[in-house]
Amino acid sequence: MKKIIDMITDEVTAVFTENGYDAKYGKVTLSNRPDLCEYQCNGAMAAAKEYKCAPFMISDKIAEGLKGNKMFESAESVKPGFINLKLSPEFLAGYVSDMKEDSGRFGCEKAKNPKTIIVDYGGPNVAKPLHVGHLRSAIIGESVKRIGKFMGHNMIGDVHLGDWGLQMGLIIVELKERKPELVYFDENYTGEYPKEAPFTISELEDIYPTASGKSKEDKNFKAAALQATHELQQGRRGYQALLQHILNVSVTDLKRNYSNLNVSFELWKGESDAQPYVPDMVQKMKDEGYAYMSEGALVVDVKEDTDAKEIPPCIILKSDGASLYSTTDLATIVMRVKEYHPDAIIYLADARQSMHFTQVFRCARKTGLVGEDVELKHIGFGTMNGKDGKPFKTRDGGVMRLEYLLDEINEQMLKKITENQKEKESLDISEEEAKQTAKTVALAAVKYGDLSNQASKDYIFDMERFTSFEGNTGPYILYTIVRIKSILKKYESAGNTLPKGGIEAAHSVGEKNLMLALSGFNAMMEGAFDEKAPHKICAYIYELANAFNGFYHGTKILSEENAQIQQSYIGLLMLTKEVLETCIDILGFSAPDRM
Ligand code: ARG
């Protein structure tokens, strides 16, 4: 369906051209004075300069020309030269009815040329538990992926595990100290290795930090870990087998954690998968004269004349020939281009990594790893801070494990929901349902709290505020959906069937406002995709929920005596619920049946 704002612009533009003015002045925007009008056109102000006359002479003519147009209830010329527009309730109801008819899409068309887009998000490190630092990548990345899917693109989410480098050697050496008898350490062993991992996830989570601590104090330990890393990378059999065990145990645990966040990945590749591509890539960069030795390291210059600040060369190999974070990201680009031919690769990573991505992207382009037609984009997100404005920490100042944080919110939510139930004695929710509901609402609280901010900004993780049922919060949105569900259920249990027909022209201002809010869905979703901006969906559903609640408080729905009007109300509720549910699904959470 055409966007409503474009339909309006077309009508206004036609009158501009009929009167001999350039079409570009007919552009219409949402009103910034909703008390006066719904849409506005400021084109006469700009046109006055070109046509050398007073703006209101133009706006008067346009308003006059729009008289009798069925799209508008009113088109007013207001001094000095604004054109204030109100839609006719019939036209608006027709648009909203078409949205309802367009099941599941609500007037939002899929992309005509679907693209293949890889979203690189998650970025957890093997053998280390997820911590709050990984939360934003997972939440925003999942939503960006779902927005693209809704728009009809082929979206591929890749977790891009941190499974390469010293951390693996550290684990191997620490494990050797604890269990030297294990066959993996016997260099003369040629048989098959056991299928069962020689550690559990909790052991693994203890092994890594212990080893990491030791390596900081004990030079010999660190040297042994470096040696083990080297041997692993050279393909030592026993270590390769251990790596597989570490990966399996770790990935199983990561999958469980991500699924609690309603986050899932199409690909479970890691940094290690890109390593086979490194030698050829480096050779090519050398052969083609891009890479040169500088201070012992192999580098590629990536600075450009227009740079306002210094962009240092991209380091391809360290002086000892080892690969770095940038090497791995470059080789991963080679792998992705070869295997998936993506039109775009989007990276979700902390904004503080922006220099790294600038260097990697420039290097990839300059050396021809990707063509000009492949978009490379880093969505850098800000820090999640505690109430003190400093990066979020546990009470004793440590890094907060994601699992513990979620447990804490679930618990708070359960308390809240149980109290709510006590107040409303009529509802008897079982303990099981209450727990499930608490989880659902808690996830909405966390995700909405994050996604409603522009990704690049820091935000304060305020559990009190995020879990509130009022205000711009996830639970408020869910509460609105639950309210609609309950009205629809009551309507049905009174022996009615849900109407299939269209929606009548609004009977009140509140109802019209709800329709106006609904009608922006397709434009909003396109904008959210173009800018990869989930916060636009949040802003839309907050406004929609407010408009719905305004309508609800001013209207008797279930006690409406005119059956035809009531059916139209119910139809409007159905559409509102479906649009809200679609939006929260794209944000990555869901609503319970009651709360
Ligand atoms: N593992 C990295 C970290 O924990 C994040 C990876 C981001 N993705 C990328 N392709 N570099 O900081």
Image: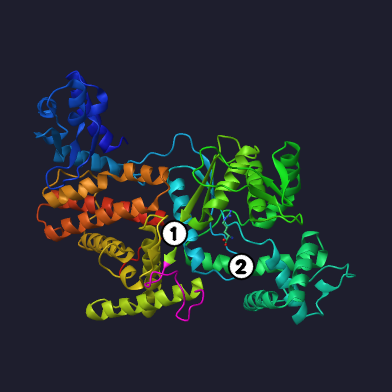
Question: Is residue 63 rendered magenta in the image?
Answer: no
Answer yes or no: is residue 73 visible.
yes
Q: Position of residue 9 (x, y in %)?
A: 24, 32
Q: Quadrant of residue 169?
A: bottom right
* Residue position for label 1: 382
Q: Position of residue 432 (x, y in %)?
A: 40, 77
Circle 2: element type:
helix
Q: Pick whichever of labels 1 and 2 is earlier in the sequence.
A: 2
Answer with left or right where residue 286 lies relative to residue 18: right
User: Principal SS element in the magenta part?
Assistant: loop
Numbered badge on residue 265? none
* Residue position for label 2: 252
Disc 1 + disc 2, Cβ < 8 Å:
no
Answer yes or no: is residue 68 visible.
no
Placement of the C terminus among the 4 image quadrants: bottom left
Placement of the N terminus among the 4 image quadrants: top left
Name which residue lies at 27% across and 68% down. 469
Q: Which residues are drawn in magenta? A: 385-400
Q: Is mark 2 within 8 Å of ligand 1?
A: no
Question: Is residue 386 rendered magenta in the image?
Answer: yes
**Amino acid type indicated by mark 2:** Thr
Circle 1: element type:
loop
**Amino acid type indicated by mark 1:** Gly
Answer with left or right where residue 232 lies relative to residue 565: right
